Image (cartoon, rainbow, N blue to C red):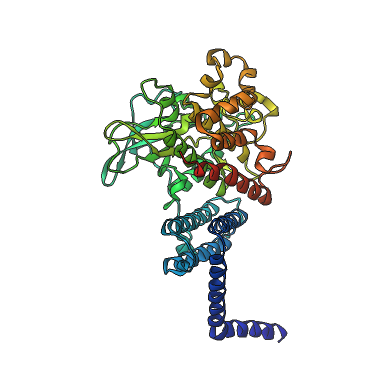
């Protein structure tokens, strides 16, 4: 009887809320909104902008600290209410220009998309605390797949016609043709090798396939936030013949291929393959881009990394090889349309995720933090967000000089491949006062400071020695400092 009484009282409270209190509470909130806008209107314009930035920082912090589908749903609902209020002209009570209002609404829409994107990521990660059963209404609101629907992202090999030159193991990507119900379409393939699967210290093939499936689901989901700057992934396939026993598969076929669509815009060339930033840096026939173009590119990449980390994914391969552009019909490169690729070693950023050890490659170690380089052996630390940010710092140096990092430092790669100490000292060389000042001489003080913070890391990003970056409060602090001191500073540069 007592239990029945308690349940009845709870039901009575809910009925009273719906019948009488809800409308009054919403009216009270609208009055608080009016009061808040009026108080904002009294402030100086610069203070208004600072407050809006603080609110945006708070929203990002809320996004980072929440993982449950229900919590993310509430965040999306709150952002939706803010957007509707501003869209109906509520913000006209403040002295906000049309440009500022549009920028503020764009930020809210971006956060809303990112919250939906993170909710989707939580549904594909079996180690997360996402519930086994998701309410259909919540799934529809967040744009998730219907509960119970299979995520078919693994494609049969026969649907893919590879470029004849695909057998080059040093080529991380290639062009291909994919057969679809509507006909054939041009795609490109990003390779993920599993020839070391099962050896000590390496993941098994089943674990690698599972990780690639998660990544394919993540990159296949639509819509993605515009700032994510990742191409749309159709799925993945195993290059090995399914009829051949695993032990007999040729080493050239021990690869998984992530299938990506070419961007479908009117001004892009239909057939020219994507070109990497490194290829552009090495091509002497290409003129150095304008400073404005390089700053916009740097900001786009820093913003992309911010959003990738917000959904708790590490890139682990951030370098100029994996920054791609598609040429326009005139054959030129549009630096504003950049895409991030090279997710072959990417993984979720949780503390329980196994770090996959990359192969030994001095050229790639140039972009890795000294503690994460392949030459460290057993002393090599597991990948973390600050290591991704370090890699971005190396790329910022390249953009400043428009040269590969080894050319900036005068490193002879032919010798470096046999001398691990050469690449171990890249960070210390880049942080020499003269090297940092050279970046400023090319791109200005703010760009110099952003690059220096990325390369220095640790206390410059709000981290203490030995802190666990997978802890929510540490991740939130890192994200705030990275946004304030890198992303925002790059966005504020005016040439």
Q: Is residue 169 left or right of residue 422?
A: left
Quadrant position of the N terminus in the picture:
bottom right
The residue sitting at 61% across, 29% down in the picture is 199
Q: Could you say where residue 187 lies in the image, as x and y percent from the top left?
A: 34, 37
Look at the picture and state if 174 lies above or below 406: below
Q: Is residue 384 visible?
A: no
Look at the picture and state if 144 lies above or below 39: above
Q: Is residue 450 left or right of residue 404?
A: right
Quadrant position of the C terminus in the picture:
top left
Q: How many numbered dots are placed on residues in this image?
A: 0
Q: Is residue 422 visible?
A: yes
The residue sitting at 63% across, 18% down in the picture is 420
The residue sitting at 62% across, 38% down in the picture is 386
Q: Could you say where residue 247 lies in the image, as x and y percent from the top left?
A: 51, 28
Q: Could you say where residue 3 lies in the image, as x and y percent from the top left?
A: 70, 82
The residue sitting at 48% across, 30% down in the picture is 399
Closest to the observer, 287 or 478: 287
Q: Quadrant of residue 46?
A: bottom right
Farthest right residue? 465
Farthest top residue? 415
Q: Could you say where residue 394 lies in the image, as x and y percent from the top left?
A: 55, 30
Look at the picture and state if 66 lies above or below 300: below
Closest to the observer, 494 or 135: 494
Closest to the observer, 214 or 307: 307
Q: Quadrant of residue 173?
A: top left
């Amino acid at each position: 009887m007592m239990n029945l009484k308690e349940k009845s009282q709870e039901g009575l409270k809910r009925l009273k809320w719906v019948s009488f209190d809800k409308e009054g509470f919403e009216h009270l909130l609208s009055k608080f909104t009016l009061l808040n806008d009026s108080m904002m209107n009294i402030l100086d314009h610069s203070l208004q902008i600072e407050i809006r930035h603080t609110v945006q920082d708070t929203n990002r912090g809320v996004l980072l600290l929440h993982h449950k589908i229900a919590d993310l749903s509430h965040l999306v609902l709150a952002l939706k209410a803010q957007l509707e209020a501003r869209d109906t002209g509520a913000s006209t009570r403040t002295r906000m220009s049309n440009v500022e209002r549009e920028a503020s609404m764009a930020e809210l829409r971006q956060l809303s998309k990112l919250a939906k994107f993170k909710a989707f990521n939580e549904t594909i990660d079996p180690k997360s605390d996402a519930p086994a059963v998701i309410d259909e209404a919540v799934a529809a609101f967040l744009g998730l797949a219907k509960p119970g629907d299979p995520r078919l992202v693994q494609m049969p090999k026969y649907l893919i016609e590879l470029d004849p030159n695909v057998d080059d193991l040093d080529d991380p990507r290639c062009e291909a043709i994919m057969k679809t119900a509507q006909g054939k379409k041009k795609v490109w393939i990003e390779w993920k090798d599993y020839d070391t699967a099962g050896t000590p210290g390496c993941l098994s093939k089943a674990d690698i396939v599972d990780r690639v499936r998660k990544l394919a689901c993540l990159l296949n989901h639509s819509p993605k936030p515009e700032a994510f700057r990742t191409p749309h992934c159709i799925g993945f396939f195993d290059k090995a013949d399914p009829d051949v026993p695993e032990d007999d598969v040729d080493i050239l076929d021990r690869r998984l291929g992530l299938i990506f669509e070419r961007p479908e815009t009117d001004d892009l060339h239909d057939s020219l393959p994507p070109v990497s930033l490194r290829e552009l840096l090495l091509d002497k026939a290409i003129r150095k881009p304008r400073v404005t173009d390089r700053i916009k590119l740097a900001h786009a990449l820093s913003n992309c990394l911010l959003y990738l980390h917000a959904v708790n994914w590490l890139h682990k391969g951030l370098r100029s090889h994996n920054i791609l552009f598609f040429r326009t019909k005139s054959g030129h490169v549009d630096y504003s349309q950049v895409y991030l690729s090279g997710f072959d070693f990417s993984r979720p950023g949780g503390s329980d995720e196994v770090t996959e050890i990359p192969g030994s490659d001095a050229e790639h170690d140039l972009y890795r933090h000294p503690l994460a380089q392949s030459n460290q052996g057993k002393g090599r630390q597991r990948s973390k967000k600050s290591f991704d940010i370090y890699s971005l710092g190396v790329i910022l140096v390249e953009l400043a000089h428009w040269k590969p990092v080894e050319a900036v430092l005068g490193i002879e790669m032919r010798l470096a491949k046999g001398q691990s100490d050469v690449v171990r000292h890249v960070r210390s060389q880049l942080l020499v006062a003269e090297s940092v000042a050279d970046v400023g001489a090319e791109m200005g003080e703010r760009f110099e400071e952003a690059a220096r913070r990325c390369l220095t890391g640790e206390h410059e990003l709000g981290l203490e020695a030995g802190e666990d970056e997978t802890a929510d409060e540490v991740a939130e602090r890192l994200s705030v400092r990275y946004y304030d001191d890198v992303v925002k500073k790059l966005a504020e540069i005016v040439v």
